[in-house]
Amino acid sequence: MTSDPSPHANSKAVALSIAGSDCSAGAGIQADLKTFHRLGVHGLTAVTSVVSETPLEVRQIETVAVSLLQSQVKILLETYPIGAIKTGMLPTRPIIIAVCELLKQVGVPIITDPVMVASSGPSLIQDDASIALASRLLPMTTLVTPNMPEASLLLGRKILAAEELETAAREISEKFQTSCLLKGGHLPGTDDKLDVLWHEGRAHHFSHPDAGIGEGVHGTGCALSSAITAEIALGRPIETAVANGIELIQQLITESDVWNHHGKSVRCLGW
């Protein structure tokens, strides 16, 4: 008689996304799941909110009950060997506090995408939630991945130029005691874009070509943070995870799908 195989013999690495649901499936937990799958990681999700949106507009946001969010996170933490956790859209202060209470003892790397403003313009987070994000969640975080507008909010001043990115990434890292990847996708012009990682006291610069696709695509920030989360769940160090994540997102942008809506381009990353 042969013994039963190990219950984990064929198991995948596991990553959890705690984020909002995007009905257009270009951002939020849908983008996270597609990215996890692309990288061979089993993806779990705890839904914080349901968003009626497309790459062109955000029409309505409904948050889930805090008790339901807590139930989702608890049952997943109890059941799966989660290797890394990504937080995305956490729209209210009670939701942020609930997530922090659940995650403070888990001992798992936390990657925070500080989703504050949609690419189409509207705010995605309440004012008091921004304060809770900064004071409660970021100090627990292993890596935070703000874009330039989000970094400006975190530092209380405008970040506008490439030469400001390294200093801003270092200041965010020191202020919140976490590593910081500051994304330069909002830099003006069509020159190469720059992302700067500040990690363990030094800067790492990642330059990549401008995508050249203009408006009408969203979810790149969600996909990048989830790619980094998947890479960390697979055991990669932060510097490698960030480099591999940026490379993947550039590929997904290049392969993006596009539809026409009354003369405007609606794009989705090419998973």
Image: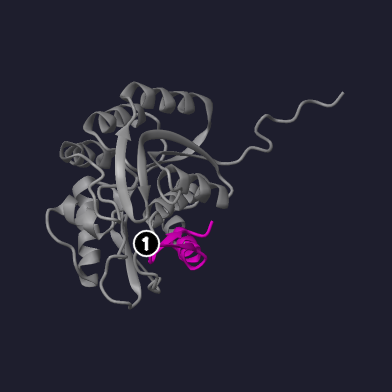
What is the magenta range? 244-271
Give the residue displayed 52% in from the left and 60% down from the top.
Answer: 270
Depth check: give the residue in front, 184 or 23: 23
| Image height of 173 relative to 106, above or below | below
Task: Look at the image and tell me whether residue 235 can be seen.
Answer: no
Give the residue displayed 33% in from the left and 78% down from the top.
Answer: 191
| Image height of 97 relative to 20, above or below | above
| Image height of 180 relative to 159, above or below | above
Looking at this view, name the residue that lies furthest to the left.
157
Task: Look at the image and tell me whether residue 133 can be seen.
Answer: yes
Depth check: give the residue in front, 98 or 252: 252
Q: Position of residue 202 (x, y in %)?
A: 30, 61
The image quarter containing residue 68 is top left
The image quarter containing residue 184 is bottom left
Q: What residue is disc 1 on?
A: 216
Q: Position of residue 129 (x, y in %)?
A: 20, 37
